[in-house]
């Protein structure tokens, strides 16, 4: 597999990082990824990351959970095995509500977590090697694409002049 | 950045991101101290005692307990409800306070969530053993079977099964999703060895990429949104175990809100007990400040007052309903043979919360610690009072009796305390007890150093 070619630019704080992302995008560079130790707000807007559709998935699965739970209990008590319990009606809607609610939450929560893991390609891997070990500590990194051939460290240095970078390396 | 002049800084000292990382990872990277070993020996001993009592119960049968024909449900259900209640603070802190954007939650949510998981697991143990035949526990789940029967979906006890298993699952997911970035931090801090491989495996190859953070935040906030009604539903359903019966003292509509408030009350008390020890033991005074303790104490005032109001409502309703059985059930609680349990409950729960109106006391660590234990005891007695006093004098005078727990039952209570503290002690050495990335994200806005800088200049 071809590994993508990039230049990594390192920062020690979020403000220069934000500034640098803006400048790089203004000069039409392609940013492969930005890695930070904690969520930096505003970066997703700058990178025009589309709002995740995870909540929609959660909603659909929530509806599914509710329908399954309610339908199943209705089927059990009206079709499969109608049982007289304390002289109450077979189709006792109020007493189906708690379980319907719990199943809605369970389905929706599991679906959203699963979607998060799948979409972010999170999987257990003992051999995983991070780009730079300090990213999860105090380092903010921008990976700039060099695939087009004319992006060089010198060029990036000139774009980012005036912004406090720690290191620019290929 | 926005600065709140009303609040003291939530993170004390002049800290860089690196300082936060190394300070919070210290318990995982370095060896444990003598105190930790002493703690785990003590709690491990209690756990072994409890496990033996569970074994004894299963081996000999429920005859080893003090239950009788009239009081068929006592210490085990009391302790079950108590643990479930304690398990409410974690998700309250992580879900409801996240939706309300309370930043002080960032230092305490991780440990509170872990506490929730352990407490719910301790609670789940009780239905398992007091079914009498634990090997047939699976009968409670609706699955196609040769008996051609389904479970009774109209029964609150079945609702309980769904509520508690959903609550545990969602809390676990929520906790783990929040842990992943911090496990990655831990993975990158360790250099070699099996430990690194294990954390590498557990970190799910987290990169910290902007897209992943975006999804991580959305997933967290959405999980919080669905966990919020879930927290409120679980104890409501537990309360319906009692409220849907016809027993005087149980048959009241105030139970669901009363139980939920009580659950959050006891949960926060347990969080305080644990955190005041943890911050001292791990030297986290800069992260868990008096400000945090005070905020939690304010929640104790609010929930404790609701609990107090519920007690008063119960008294009023037993008179106002005009039902002589209700009236007798209350008088029996207050002045009957278990009067001492009722008054322990009132003094520990109602009195204690009101003392916290005094600022000097709610910002005092020793006092808060002492009070949190008092509240834990009081809340345990609340459940004991509700359950035992309502049962022991039923409709038929000839079957009135007294209930006295046996050593096996006390053993189960002590045993779950042992399991709880052992698991918590293991947790603080395996995972960061404070959410590292969340603390870093508020370091600039809520940290003492930058806050002061801003205030002096502004």
Image: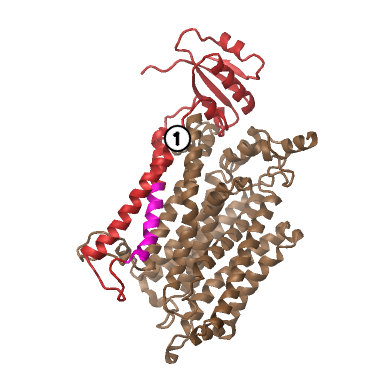
Chain colours: A red, B brown
Relative image position of residue A112 (x, y in whole percent)? 41, 42
Within 10 angstroms of label 1, few (less than 14), some, or many (20 or more) residues?
some
Q: Position of residue B413 (x, y in %)?
A: 50, 68
In the image, what residue occupies the spot 73% across and 38% down? B451
**Picture residue at 54% right of the left edge, 85% below the top:** B332
In this rendered view, identify the residue nearer to me: B182 or B259: B259
Q: Is residue A141 above or below residue B251?
A: above
Q: Which residues are magenta?
A: A92-108
Q: Is residue B45 visible?
A: no
Magenta stretch: dominant secondary structure: helix
Q: Is residue B125 above or below residue B226?
A: below
A106 magenta-colored:
yes
The reply, left or right, for residue A121 in relation to residue B279 is left
Query: What residue does disc 1 label?
Result: A52
Q: Is residue B310 magenta?
A: no
Above or below, A23 against B336 in this view is above
């Amino acid at each position: 597999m071809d590994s993508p070619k990039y230049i990594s630019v390192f920062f020690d704080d979020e403000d220069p990082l934000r500034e640098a992302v803006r400048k790089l995008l203004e000069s039409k560079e392609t940013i492969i990824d930005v890695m930070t130790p904690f969520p930096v707000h505003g970066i997703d807007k700058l990178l025009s990351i589309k709002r995740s559709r995870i909540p929609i998935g959660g909603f659909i699965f929530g509806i599914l959970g509710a329908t399954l739970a309610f339908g199943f209990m209705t089927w059990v008590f009206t079709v499969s095995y109608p049982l007289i319990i304390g002289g109450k009606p077979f189709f006792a809607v109020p007493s189906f509500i708690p379980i319907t609610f719990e199943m809605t939450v369970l389905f929706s929560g599991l679906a959203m977590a699963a979607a998060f893991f799948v979409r972010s390609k999170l999987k257990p891997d003992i051999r995983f090697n991070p780009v730079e070990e300090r990213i999860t500590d105090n380092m903010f990194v921008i990976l700039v694409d060099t695939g087009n051939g004319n992006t060089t460290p010198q060029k990036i240095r000139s774009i980012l002049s005036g912004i406090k970078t720690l290191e620019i390396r290929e | 950045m926005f600065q709140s002049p009303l609040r003291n800084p939530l993170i004390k000292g002049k800290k860089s991101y690196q300082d936060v990382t190394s300070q919070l990872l210290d318990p995982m990277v370095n060896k444990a101290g003598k105190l930790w070993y002493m703690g785990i020996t003590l709690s491990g001993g209690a756990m072994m005692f409890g496990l033996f009592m569970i074994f004894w119960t299963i081996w000999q049968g429920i005859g080893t307990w003090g239950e009788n024909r009239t009081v068929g449900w006592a210490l085990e259900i009391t302790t079950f409800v108590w643990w479930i209640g304690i398990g409410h603070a974690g998700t309250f802190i992580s879900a409801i306070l996240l939706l309300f954007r309370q930043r002080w939650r960032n230092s305490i949510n991780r440990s509170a969530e872990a506490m929730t998981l352990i407490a719910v697991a301790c609670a789940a143990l009780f239905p398992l053993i007091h079914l009498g035949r634990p090997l047939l526990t699976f009968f409670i789940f609706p699955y196609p079977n040769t008996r051609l029967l389904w479970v009774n979906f109209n029964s609150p006890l079945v609702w309980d099964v769904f509520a508690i298993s959903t609550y545990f699952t969602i809390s676990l997911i929520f906790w783990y999703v929040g842990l992943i970035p911090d496990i990655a931090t831990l993975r990158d801090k360790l250099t070699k060895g099996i430990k690194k491989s294990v954390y590498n495996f557990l970190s799910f190859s987290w990169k910290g990429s902007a897209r992943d953070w975006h999804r991580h935040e959305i997933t967290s906030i959405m999980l919080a949104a669905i966990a919020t009604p879930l927290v409120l539903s679980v104890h409501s359903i537990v309360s319906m175990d009692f409220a849907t019966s016809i027993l005087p003292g149980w048959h009241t509509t105030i139970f669901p809100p009363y139980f939920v408030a009580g659950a959050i009350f006891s949960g926060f008390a347990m969080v305080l007990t644990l955190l005041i020890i943890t911050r001292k033991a791990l030297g986290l005074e800069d992260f868990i400040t008096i400000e945090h303790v005070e905020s939690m104490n304010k929640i104790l005032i609010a929930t404790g007052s609701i609990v107090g109001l519920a007690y008063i409502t119960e008294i009023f309703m037993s008179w106002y309903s005009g039902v002589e059985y209700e009236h007798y059930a209350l008088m029996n609680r207050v002045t009957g043979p278990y009067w001492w349990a009722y008054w322990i409950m009132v003094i520990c729960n109602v009195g204690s919360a009101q003392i916290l109106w005094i600022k000097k006391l709610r910002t005092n660590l020793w006092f808060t610690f002492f009070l949190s234990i008092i509240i834990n005891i009081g809340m345990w007695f609340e459940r004991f009072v509700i359950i035992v006093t309502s049962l022991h004098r039923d409709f038929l005078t000839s079957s009135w009796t007294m209930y006295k727990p046996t050593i096996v039952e006390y053993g189960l209570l002590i045993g779950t305390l042992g399991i709880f503290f052992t698991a918590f002690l293991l947790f603080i050495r395996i995972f960061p007890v404070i959410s590292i990335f969340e603390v870093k994200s508020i370091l600039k806005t809520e940290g003492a150093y930058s806050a002061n800088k801003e205030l002096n200049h502004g």
